[in-house]
Amino acid sequence: MALRQPISRQRQEPTIALINIVFLMLVFFLVAGTITANQAGDVNLVTVADLAGQQPADAVVIYADGSIYLRGEPVDVQSAVLAMSSDTSDVVRLMPDRDLPAQELVRIAGEFANSGAKNIVVVTERGTSQ
């Protein structure tokens, strides 16, 4: 009686070892994240949700039609730069209307730069996700 040769089976890859390594990495990062010290300590951070937004001092307001106002009075770009240059700050704050086209805002900011404004800042409203 002849014995049959055993059927050779291919060894499957040990997926348990891979799962163990991933689990150990997960545990390591969870522990490492909880060990880090709290930078704030017992400090209670400021809440700004209840504050009313208001216009910054001496901001140049640009309405949707392109009209420019400084301190509530209509002005042109040269007058605004001259008025702002007399202040101690060298920053010109532009506060555009939401409906002002972006091309118009870029054009007006370019006029401010050509008129001698060194630092031009566009003031925007910070969005909150609630």
Image (cartoon, rainbow, N blue to C red):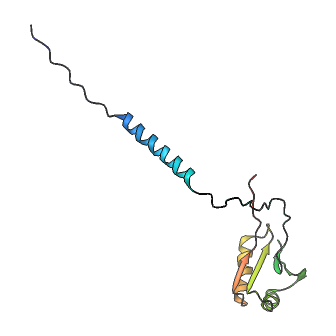
Location of residue 23 in the rendering, given as x and y in whole percent from the top left corner: 46, 40
Say whether residue 14 is left or right of residue 81.
left
Say whether residue 22 is left or right of residue 109.
left
Q: Is residue 61 above or below residue 14?
A: below
Residue 60, quarter of the rendered image = bottom right
Going by the picture, which residue comes out furthest to the left? Answer: 1
- Residue drawn at the location 76% of the way across and 73% of the way down: 123
- Residue drawn at the location 59% of the way across and 57% of the way down: 37
Q: In this view, does 118 lie above or below 23?
A: below
Say whether residue 63 is left or right of residue 8.
right
Location of residue 125 in the rendering, given as x and y in whole percent from the top left corner: 77, 66
- Residue drawn at the location 81% of the way across and 79% of the way down: 59
Which quarter of the rendering shows the N terminus? top left
- Residue drawn at the location 41% of the way across and 38% of the way down: 20
Q: Is residue 35 above or below residue 106?
A: above
Foreground pick, 75 / 35: 35
Residue 18, quarter of the rendered image = top left
Going by the picture, which residue comes out furthest to the top? Answer: 1
Location of residue 63 in the rendering, given as x and y in whole percent from the top left corner: 83, 73
Foreground pick, 48 / 59: 48
Q: Is residue 13 above or below residue 6?
A: below
Say whether residue 28 is left or right of residue 4.
right
